[in-house]
Image: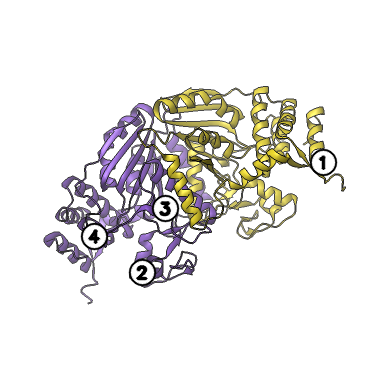
Chain colours: A purple, B yellow
Amino acid sequence: MTAERTEIHIAFEALELLLKEIFIHNGVSCSTADILAANCAGCERDGAISHGIFRIPGYLASLKTGWVDGHAVAEVSSVSPSFIRIDARNGFAQAALAAAAKDIDTAVARTGIAVVATRNSHHFSALWPDVEPFARRGLLAITFVNGLANVVPHGGHTPVYGTNPVAFATPIAGADPLVVDQATSVMANGEVRLHALANRPLPPGTGVDRAGNPSTDPHQVLEGGALNTFGGYKGSSIALMVELMAGALTGGQLSFENDFGDCIGAQTPKAGQLLIVIDPDRGGNFGFSRRVALLCDRLREAGQERLPGKRRYESRLNASQLGIPILEEDLRYLETLADHNAFVS
Amino acid sequence: MTAERTEIHIAFEALELLLKEIFIHNGVSCSTADILAANCAGCERDGAISHGIFRIPGYLASLKTGWVDGHAVAEVSSVSPSFIRIDARNGFAQAALAAAAKDIDTAVARTGIAVVATRNSHHFSALWPDVEPFARRGLLAITFVNGLANVVPHGGHTPVYGTNPVAFATPIAGADPLVVDQATSVMANGEVRLHALANRPLPPGTGVDRAGNPSTDPHQVLEGGALNTFGGYKGSSIALMVELMAGALTGGQLSFENDFGDCIGAQTPKAGQLLIVIDPDRGGNFGFSRRVALLCDRLREAGQERLPGKRRYESRLNASQLGIPILEEDLRYLETLADHNAFVS
């Protein structure tokens, strides 16, 4: 038992390769496996462990049951010089976004803005990997994703929204980008599942049980219960905005329309994603990133200790020096999935 | 005293005309007076009284001291087919937006999207009047405004943000548009000022005093203190996003850069506004407004009693039948401002 709980370290590239093998061995095309593996290994590396290897069984269950198509080829349509629509064809959202990369670049270069509306997509990861790369190139990016209905609107008793995260990223002069990624629920779903695994109670106000009563039991929240939106009615309105942008505007499904049917064990949400990329310097507004740096300085002076995303960068730096910390038993498990396609739901 | 506190009713058009006269008599051009009067009378009509006639002394103080230019003519630049930059030239944001109306229409017609970045502008009203008209034409609109630094970031002790509201509006099939307008502070500043006028304590958690300690005294919050962001660190990140979008991306001032200098009594914030207008049906996504209607139905079924904006529509309907309720003393006061240019700060 002691041996099994041993923490070891693995290089990013090694974890990425292992995850790629797992995805390929479980029905994902090579190009999509590349994208998902880099994404998932990146989450593990950055300490976003609720979106790291912890999610692999969920990915595989969705693939195994046919709920998601690992071989989907997204259809990208530039419906205007600035507006891109993507039909992900029931594939993963990250692959759809990658398929539109050139069109996004073209739109931003030509018009200073790209609106990317993806439908029929499964987004089962963190959102920051979708926006951070744009900020590294001097662009501002903001994105919204809806999901599985497991969040009650403020004042309500039945789940309507997904955890409906919002992410945005901007360059900061002389520093890593500022990257925010947060669910509009009190807690992200992956965090609740980590609490459930550890049998750790949730903070009061996090969610409700099946009957709509407040509950701090992560199992009750996950099994027929639901999460609350953050910040009362105002947070609920932000969740609504995300649902409208990511679900309705994209032509995708609304969170409450997910119905797994015979796909027992499937976990990925079939929903939509809206991404807006803006060149902040378009039109003579030079020096945007220096202005952001000034704002960040002021926030630190005002006493805000951590700017959003700082913890991820710290984990990333540590991982680049020491490797990614991972339990030996988890690594062995991943190896079985890669070698033998041995996953049983 | 009893006579003075009498509530009377005034027709929308009569209030609008009176307010227009006040603005013109206090240094506002005729076209801008039209816009501000319709906006302010609309707030009063819709029960958004913290942005109604209550704001007139603030408008006039800013005008009287030269802090804002009531005769400013905004410079509108279409920097791409979808991207419009506006220099409001130290005038009111609503007049700047009106000046760009044709360009916005052209951008949305051509590309399905308009990004409107306004700088050097004063936004002293509610945000919903800026977005609701787009939704009435079948468009989705979202806007962000920064302001005067009177909100502390989560975990901080000094104000950095304005109340930094977000508003968005979408059409709903068969109903008035869905319109959200909310500050990212726990409470809007106008609400705090209404509490101060009434000597009514604030709910716990609303703000801090000059020393950064929690306070429920609206006077302490207004005089050297500050408001908290809603929803803890997540709400604080939304306030940050607004500051970046409305302040930095537009090329405008950041909230903490407002310095009234010799303009004693001026109240309007010199800041920026970002507006994004999207044609949700562009690119074959027909039926958006019916999808929104479906979502709204589900929210009501889930137990959410009031959809955002419902109260405003109720007030508007009442006012259309009975007139706008207003205190007789307030009306007399407004009349003095219109007739005699008699305002003393």
Image position of A251 with respect to B157: above or below: above
Please, which chain is the residue tagged with disc 2 on?
A
Front tag of 4 and 2:
4
Separation of marks 1 and 4 at Cα, in angstroms:
69 Å
Amino acid found under the numbered disc labelled 2: Ala
Amino acid found under the numbered disc labelled 1: Glu
Separation of marks 2 and 3 at Cα, in angstroms:
20 Å
Separation of marks 3 and 4 at Cα, in angstroms:
25 Å
* Mark 2 residue element: helix
Separation of marks 2 and 1 at Cα, in angstroms:
61 Å
Residue beneath disc 3: A182
Residue beneath disc 4: A61
- Going from N to C along the chain, the mark reached first, 2 or 3, is 3
Quick check: marks 2 and 3 in contact, CB under 8 Å? no
Quick check: marks 3 and 4 in contact, CB under 8 Å? no
- Going from N to C along the chain, the mark reached first, 3 or 4, is 4
Residue most toward the bottom? A1
Assess disc 1: are there few (<14), some (14-19) or many (≥20) residues with their C-alpha within 10 Å of its C-alpha.
some
- Left or right: residue A98 versus residue B284 is left
Do callouts 4 and 2 point to residues on the same chain?
yes
* Mark 1 residue element: helix
- Left or right: residue A284 versus residue A19 is right
Q: Position of residue A60 (x, y in %)?
A: 22, 58
Residue beneath disc 1: B329
> Is any part of residue B265 visible from this angle?
no
Q: Nearer the viewer, residue B203 or B53?
A: B53
Residue most toward the left? A340
Assess disc 4: are there few (<14), some (14-19) or many (≥20) residues with their C-alpha within 10 Å of its C-alpha.
many
Q: Nearer the viewer, residue A62 or B137?
A: B137
Please, which chain is the residue tagged with disc 1 on?
B
Front tag of 3 and 1:
1
